Amino acid sequence: MDSQPTISSQPNLLDFVAALDNVRAIVTVLKAISYKEHVICFITRIGLTFIVQDSQSAQSIAYMRHELFREYAFPSLDYQAGEEASPEISFSVNLQKLIECLSIFGGMSSVPYGSASSSYTTSNQHDLKSGVQTTLRMHYAKAEGTLKLILEDQGVVTVCKLRTYVADPTVELRANFNASPTTSKLIINSEWLKGAFSELDETSTSIRLLISPRPPYFRISASGLSGQTNIDYPNDTDVLEGFTSQATQTYSYNQKLFVPCLKALALSTKTSVKINLEGFLFLQFLIPVGEKANCFVDFLSCPTVDDSDQDTDED
């Protein structure tokens, strides 16, 4: 860690520069997917994408669009070669160390804006009431393989440098989901889902989702040592938004792969649920990161058992 902030005297050699007025936004997004050691970062002109791969069957994807940043400079040229730069920059970095560096001034609770939870830390309450914010300036130099974070809080500046690594290939789960028609989708208040998952038996090995054009419409169930638990949601606009189901579908998902998405669920206000014809599950969490700003975290998972029952009644 440097004691003095230093900015390259040759800014055209920097592959990427971005600045945030409040580091809280990126900390919140990263905490939503912080269940693996490393995260893969993709930088494009559109914004930042963070991917955490959990085996070949599930992954979490967090997005931060460039509009969230006060400054966002993506290189248009490869200054050394004098040619068009790659449309994206990618690297892998230790996720926990990244969060620790970004939270070095404290006050970065995992509770998002607009959350109903009351578990704010004392420093976080001070941050919200006093308007004190930690600003962030990010530099990524591909040639150095270094991600530099310059944080300033009430005139105190800290510079952190993190080593980056070549990103491993990721499974194109989003493309796999899009390859098959979406047959069921709905939007639900995240508080409803949080309550449901808290009631499921932790000893169960799988979670089963049922979506149907007929009652029970949307059901979450799990079987464990204490028996089977079924939680049903009515097709009511106060509970489910934009509910669509073309056929009764029932698919099971590995609970161990499913658990990591609960971090994003806990930070979100709304959740979009989609299942395609092959039973591929796509969850999208709306996470507030400011008074008028939101980010999205996607979770994708393959079904473990194809027990879909199309166009049949469910008891």
Image: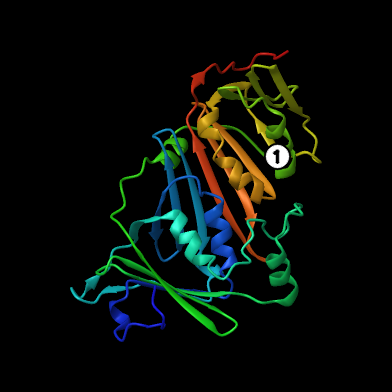
Q: Quadrant of residue 141?
A: bottom left
Residue closer to the observer: 8 or 288: 8
Q: Position of residue 210 (x, y in %)?
A: 64, 24
Residue at far left of view: 81
Is 271 situated above or below 209?
A: below
User: Residue visible at 57% across and 53% down?
Assistant: 296
- Give the residue number, with chain letter if any, for mark 1: 194
Drawn side of residue 235 relative to residue 59, left or right: right
Query: Badge 1 local density, few (<14 within 10 Å), some, or many (20+)?
Result: some
Residue 217 or residue 138, whichever sits in front = 138
Q: Is residue 297 left or right of residue 245?
A: left
Q: Quadrant of the N terminus?
A: bottom left
- Image coordinates for residue 97, horizontal then vertical, percent: 44, 59
Q: Is residue 39 left or right of residue 66?
A: left
Element assignment for label 1: helix
| Colour setting | rainbow
Q: Residue at x 74, y 43 (%)?
A: 191
> Up-down: is 74 above or below 92?
below
> What amino acid type should be assigned to the residue bearing mark 1?
Lys
Q: Does 92 sit above or below residue 47? A: above
The picture quadrant where one finds residue 243 is top right
In depth, the one of 248 and 229 nearer the eye is 229
